[in-house]
Image (cartoon, grey):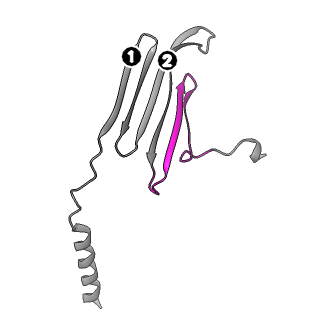
């Protein structure tokens, strides 16, 4: 019985140690954009495997905790990729004075406060 267990562990060790193919698919950037100005920036890229990212940042004036105006960079963007099931997923996001907020099918949604009453 012990020898069967040892053989099973040996086979498992060989399988784990087997070389992985060095032929990973080559991904290339097929489009790239990067622009900057005093008002903000814009950038994006697209790769040959379908990954896509677009983002803009714009300087905006907001009120801080003391109701005094201050300038912040508000970022808006999205990225698209293939998930582990081979489905296309798109995530959109905004980062501003209130924090980072992302939405998309892969982003969990917190239960509403009304549902817990």
Report the front residue among 101 and 53: 53
Mark 2 or mark 1, earlier in chain: 1
Q: In this view, does 11 lie above or below 82?
A: below
What label does residue 55 carry, if any?
none
| Picture mark count | 2
Q: What element carries label 1?
A: strand
From the image, which quarter does the N terminus lie in? Answer: bottom left
Mark 2, residues whose alpha carbon is within 10 Å: few (<14), some, or many (≥20)? some
Locate residue 14, reporting x and y percent. Answer: 22, 73
90 part of magenta stretch: yes
Q: Is residue 53 above or below residue 49?
A: above
What label does residue 36 carry, if any?
1
**For mark 2, what is the residue?**
58
Q: In which quarter of the image is residue 54?
A: top left
**Residue at point 28% right, 81% down?**
8
Q: What element carries label 2?
A: strand
67 part of magenta stretch: no
Locate residue 113, reporting x and y percent. Answer: 73, 41
Q: In this view, does 36 lie above or below 90?
A: above
**Residue at point 47% right, 24% down?**
56
Task: Determine whether, in the image, residue 61 is placed left or right of residue 55.
Answer: right
**Residue at point 71% right, 42% down?**
112
Q: Is residue 85 above or below residue 42?
A: below
Q: In which quarter of the image is residue 37?
A: top left
- Is label 2 in contact with label 1 (beta carbons under 8 Å)? no
Task: Determine whether, in the image, residue 9 is placed left or right of residue 96.
Answer: left
Q: Give the range drawn in magenta.
A: 83-109
């Amino acid at each position: 019985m012990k020898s069967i267990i040892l053989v099973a562990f040996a086979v498992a060790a060989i399988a784990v140690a087997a070389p992985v193919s060095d032929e990973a698919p080559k991904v290339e950037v097929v489009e790239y954009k990067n622009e900057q100005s005093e008002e903000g920036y814009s950038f994006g890229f697209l790769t040959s495997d379908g990954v896509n990212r677009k983002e803009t940042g714009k300087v905006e004036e907001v009120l801080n905790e003391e109701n005094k105006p201050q300038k912040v960079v508000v970022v808006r963007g999205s990225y698209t990729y293939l998930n582990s099931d081979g489905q296309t997923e798109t995530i959109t996001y905004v980062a501003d004075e209130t924090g980072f907020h992302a939405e998309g099918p892969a982003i969990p949604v917190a239960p509403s406060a009304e549902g817990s009453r």
